[in-house]
Structures are given as structure tokens and as C-alpha cells.
């Protein structure tokens, strides 16, 4: 303290002001460093909220006493409290989505509500519910739905309803798959709405699907690539349960039918007839009469009595039977339609690694898997893919040694940043403040706290006045010239020596005293020696 007091007394007014400012700056830097070190790490709570929803969230945070920061449209809270705060806000139905749904119907009363008012509120609620459903999709930031349902009037042809959907994606633009899903969602939710009458618009890219565009809900995989990938994943998961992960490689090829074919077939089996009706009819006839006799002389006489004696009596009878039977014949009709994409042939190739045993000395030995195990694995593969021998399917399984995979890169170890829960911006701020504090200490406080120059005593002053202890300027100049010859002259040193000579010539007494102090000053180690 005495040294500081003496140092303060020896300072002039300008140095005292600088010392005070430097001290205040140092204290401010230390306080800032302490606050940054003790400040909690902030994490994102919500971003992109509507102003009304954001105001409600901030009001709730202030009531709960949770510290928060606003960075543009984002709200940050301490990292260790983020999950708890989100659950608390969710219990309060915050943040509000800003889109009203069927709750609009709760505000309608039976008195004073006309049919037009109810219809308008109903369609607003329908639009809000559809927008909420669209916002539930991953990556969707905003959605609006507009439904135009024309009013039906008597003696007027019915008009089909139309709709439009406006989507805003959080990661770029809305792709065609998302647009089709939104179109069919809206069309399925509104009775009588055709998907072709729904227009899907991206807020960034513009119209994605215009009204009237034909957009099938799903395109069939004609090449069979997707089906092959699905079968391969199933087989790898099945084999991994036995041989282990990475010990089996599966390749599946699906040969599909690329043309369409319709086959009609009709088969009639006459041996499998069945009587369904029988009909029988009988017919009988009989007749009797007198016929003329043979030609004789008596028959030619005109006497009738004689003529009657020559006649004969005749009889005739007939019988007819008819029958008819109706039979039903067995008939089979088949019609087969083969569309593109059907499986024509399936080929599966499976390669499994063998068994590796490690001896006591550390050497490894690879052996092929037993044939019985390969047969069992083959049966599992055939069952999993739906093997059909009549279709020409082929399944091949073999056991071969796998080559070891090279290790790429180095193993990730925990670094310094993993030990401290701070982000990059906090580290940069700490580094800048530490640098400022170091500069203040080195270039401001240290020179001010350094030892003051040795003051001249009264004896030294008297000696200077008497001329004692002074060095002749000519001798000092000669010594400087000798030192210059030893060190070797350089342009820079010559300029400095010239300046020094001029200073010695002008202020010879002070130069002599300074040189004397240098010669008499000793280090503490030299005194001890």
C-alpha cells in the first residue's frame, strides 16, 4: 500500500486520470467475464410464431419467471429448462396455432343464427381443421385452405365445389408428392369435391398442381425395383438373426410383366350331365271295315244279291310312344387379366460369411458353414420370398469368406467443447474480453506500476556541480566509436549513433549520470555471489 501511495503521489494529473480509466475498464471486463461465465446457455424454444401467439408465450414466461431472449422471430430460454417450459406451455394450449377449427361452432347459439350464418361458420371450421391437418405434416410451416361451395338454388343445375390450398414448407419448396397428398386430403374431406378441382399452390414456387391436372394417387412400380428392395431388406433382417449383422449379403431380382393380357376360357364337360326334365307321350289307333272281294263272273252280274256275297271285312290298329329328356351340362368359364407389374420370375442370391474361430495363441481360422445350415437357411429364404417353382424362381445360397473392410478415418473422441456446455459464440465473447483485459494489464497497468526512475540525491547533484564523477564527453564518444567498430557498422546503427552523439553533446550531464547509474546498478544474484 505504501508503494501504491507513493506511486500515486508521484503521478501527475494526466497519469492519474489514465490510471482511473484503466482501473474502471479492467473492473468492467472482469465483471463481463464473470457474467458470461455464469450466464446459462440458451436454447431455441419456438421460432416463426405469429405475433399474437408469440406475445401469449412471452406473457406466460414472464408470469412463470423464466428468463428468455428474443432474437428476431425466435424465443430462447435456458437449455436446462427448455423441455419443462414446453410441457408447461402445452398444458396451457400454447402456442396457439392461430387457425380456428370446429371450436367456431361452439360459439353459435340456437337464437339469432340463420342458415347462412351457420353455413359460413361451418365452412370456416372445415377450412381450419384441414389447415391444422396439413400443418401436422413434417416440415410444413404454414397452410391455408379455401373451399368454394356454391349455393344450390331451385331449377338450377348443380355446380361442383372447388378448393385451393396454399402451402409453405420450412425446408425449401413443396414437392409434387406433398402436393398430391394435400389435394386428396381436401377432396376426401369435402363431399362431392373432385380431386381434379383442387389447386395446390406453393408460396415460393407458385402453382404445383392446377385444377384439371391428372395426378394419380400412386404409380405402380412396373420395374419391380421397389419390391426387390423390400424383399432384400426382409431377407437381410431375417439372416442377421442367425449369422449376425453384416455377415450376409442379399441380392434380389424381380422380373416383372410389362405387357397387359386378357385370357377368356370356356370348358364344357359332357360326362357330367344332369337330367333336369323328362317328357313321354303315347299314341294308339284302331279301325275296322268291309272291302270288295275278288273279281269273278258272279260279281259281274247285275243281281245285287250275288254281288254282296263277294265282299270281305278288314281291321287295322297302330301304337306310337315318344319320349324327351333335358340335361344340364357342366360348364366352366375363366377370364384372366394380367396387368403390367405382375411378377414373372424371381431370383435371389444370398452370400453368408463362414465361421471364424480364435485359437489360444490369437490366430483366427475361417471355416465354411455346414451344408445342413445352408439348406435350412435356403428354406427360410424360399418361404420369405414366396418361392414358386412353376414360375421359374431361383434361390441360390452359398458360404464364402468375406474380405475385411478397411477402416476409414479416425475414431471420434470427446473434445474440449464436449466438456463444457457453451456454444461457439460464448467462447468467442470470452476470448475477446480476455484479450482486452490482457492488453489493459500489459500496456496500461504494468508501465504505471513499474519501478520509478532513480532520483538524483543531493550528493549526486553536488558532485555534478563540482565536476566529480563525470565522464569526459570525448572519452564517451571514443568508447561509442570503438563499440561501433566491434559490432560492425550498419546504416541503421550509424543513424542511431549519430542521434545519440547529438543528444550527448547537448545534454552531457544527464548522459553521464545515466551511464553511471547503469554501471553501478547490480542484479540481486550478483550481490549474492
Image (tube, rainbow, N blue to C red):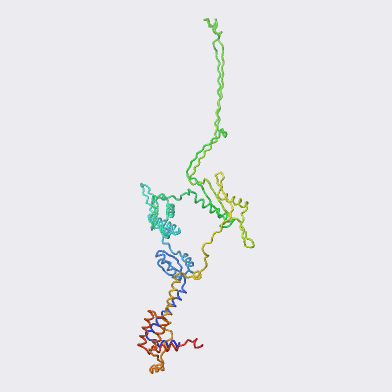
Q: Nearer the viewer, residue 332 or 130?
A: 332
Q: How many marks?
A: 0
Image quadrant in which the N terminus is located: bottom left
**In the depicted structure, whether residue 191 falls above or below residue 30:** above
Q: Nearer the viewer, residue 382 or 485?
A: 485
Q: Residue furthest right?
A: 360
Whether residue 398 is visible to the viewer of this picture, yes or no, is yes
Q: Quadrant of residue 123?
A: bottom left
Instruction: From the viewer's perspective, tell me whether residue 77 is left or right of residue 243.
Output: left
**In the depicted structure, whether residue 39 falls above or below residue 527:** above
Q: Quadrant of residue 426?
A: bottom left
**In the depicted structure, whether residue 344 falls above or below residue 102:** above
Image x and y of residue 231, in percent? 53, 52
Residue visible at 47% across and 72% down in the picture = 40
Q: Nearer the viewer, residue 18 or 173?
A: 18
Image x and y of residue 107, in percent? 41, 60
Whether residue 108 is visible to the viewer of this picture, yes or no, is no
Image x and y of residue 336, in percent? 50, 41
Amino acid at each position: 500500500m505504501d508503494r501504491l501511495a507513493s506511486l500515486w503521489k508521484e503521478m501527475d494529473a494526466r497519469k492519474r486520470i489514465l490510471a482511473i480509466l484503466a482501473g474502471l475498464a479492467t473492473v468492467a471486463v472482469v465483471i463481463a467475464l464473470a457474467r458470461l461465465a455464469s450466464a446459462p446457455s440458451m436454447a431455441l424454444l419456438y421460432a416463426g410464431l405469429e405475433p399474437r401467439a408469440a406475445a401469449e408465450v412471452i406473457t406466460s414466461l414472464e408470469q412463470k419467471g423464466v428468463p428468455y431472449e428474443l432474437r428476431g422471430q425466435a424465443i430462447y430460454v435456458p437449455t436446462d429448462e427448455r423441455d419443462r417450459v414446453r410441457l408447461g406451455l402445452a398444458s396451457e394450449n400454447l402456442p396457439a396455432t392461430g387457425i380456428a377449427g370446429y371450436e367456431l361452432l361452439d360459439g353459435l347459439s340456437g337464437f339469432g343464427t340463420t342458415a347462412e350464418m351457420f353455413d359460413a361458420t361451418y365452412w370456416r371450421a372445415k377450412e381450419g381443421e384441414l389447415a391444422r391437418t396439413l400443418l401436422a405434416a413434417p416440415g410444413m410451416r404454414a397452410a391455408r385452405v379455401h373451399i368454394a361451395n356454391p349455393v344450390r338454388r331451385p331449377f338450377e343445375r348443380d355446380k361442383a365445389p372447388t378448393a385451393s390450398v396454399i402451402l409453405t414448407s420450412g425446408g425449401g419448396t413443396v414437392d409434387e408428392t406433398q402436393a398430391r397428398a394435400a389435394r386428396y386430403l381436401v377432396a376426401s374431406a369435402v363431399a362431392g369435391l373432385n380431386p381434379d378441382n383442387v389447386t395446390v399452390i406453393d408460396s415460393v414456387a407458385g402453382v404445383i398442381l392446377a385444377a384439371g391436372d391428372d395426378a394419380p394417387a400412386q404409380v405402380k412400380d412396373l420395374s419391380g425395383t421397389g419390391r426387390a428392395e423390400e424383399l432384400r431388406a426382409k431377407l437381410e433382417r431375417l439372416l442377421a438373426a442367425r449369422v449376425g449383422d453384416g455377415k450376409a449379403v442379399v441380392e434380389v431380382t424381380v422380373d416383372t410383366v410389362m405387357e397387359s393380357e386378357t385370357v377368356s376360357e370356356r370348358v364344357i364337360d359332357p360326362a357330367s350331365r344332369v337330367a333336369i326334365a323328362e317328357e313321354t307321350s303315347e299314341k294308339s289307333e284302331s279301325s275296322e271295315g268291309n272291302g270288295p272281294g275278288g273279281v269273278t263272273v258272279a260279281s259281274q252280274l247285275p243281281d245285287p244279291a250275288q254281288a254282296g256275297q263277294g265282299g270281305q271285312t278288314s281291321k287295322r290298329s297302330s301304337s306310337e310312344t315318344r319320349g324327351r329328356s333335358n340335361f344340364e351340362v357342366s360348364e366352366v368359364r375363366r377370364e384372366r387379366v394380367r396387368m403390367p407389374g405382375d411378377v414373372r420370375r424371381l431370383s435371389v442370391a444370398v452370400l453368408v460369411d463362414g465361421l471364424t474361430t480364435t485359437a489360444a495363441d490369437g490366430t483366427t481360422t475361417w471355416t465354411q458353414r455346414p451344408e445342413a445350415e445352408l439348406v435350412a437357411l435356403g428354406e427360410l429364404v424360399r418361404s420369405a420370398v414366396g418361392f414358386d417353382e412353376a414360375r421359374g424362381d431361383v434361390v441360390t445360397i452359398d458360404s464364402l469368406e468375406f474380405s475385411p473392410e478397411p477402416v476409414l478415418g479416425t475414431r471420434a473422441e470427446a473434445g474440449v467443447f464436449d466438456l463444457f456446455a457453451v456454444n461457439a459464440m460464448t467462447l468467442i465473447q470470452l476470448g475477446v474480453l480476455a484479450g482486452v483485459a490482457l492488453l489493459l494489464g500489459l500496456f496500461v497497468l504494468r508501465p504505471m506500476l513499474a519501478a520509478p526512475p532513480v532520483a538524483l540525491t543531493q550528493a549526486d547533484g553536488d558532485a555534478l556541480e563540482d565536476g566529480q564523477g563525470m565522464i569526459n564527453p570525448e572519452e564517451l564518444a571514443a568508447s561509442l566509436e570503438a563499440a561501433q567498430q566491434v559490432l560492425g557498422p550498419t546504416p541503421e546503427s550509424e543513424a542511431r549513433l549519430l542521434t545519440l552523439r547529438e543528444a550527448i553533446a547537448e545534454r552531457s550531464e544527464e548522459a553521464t549520470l545515466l551511464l553511471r547509474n547503469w554501471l553501478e546498478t547490480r542484479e540481486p544474484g550478483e550481490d549474492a555471489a
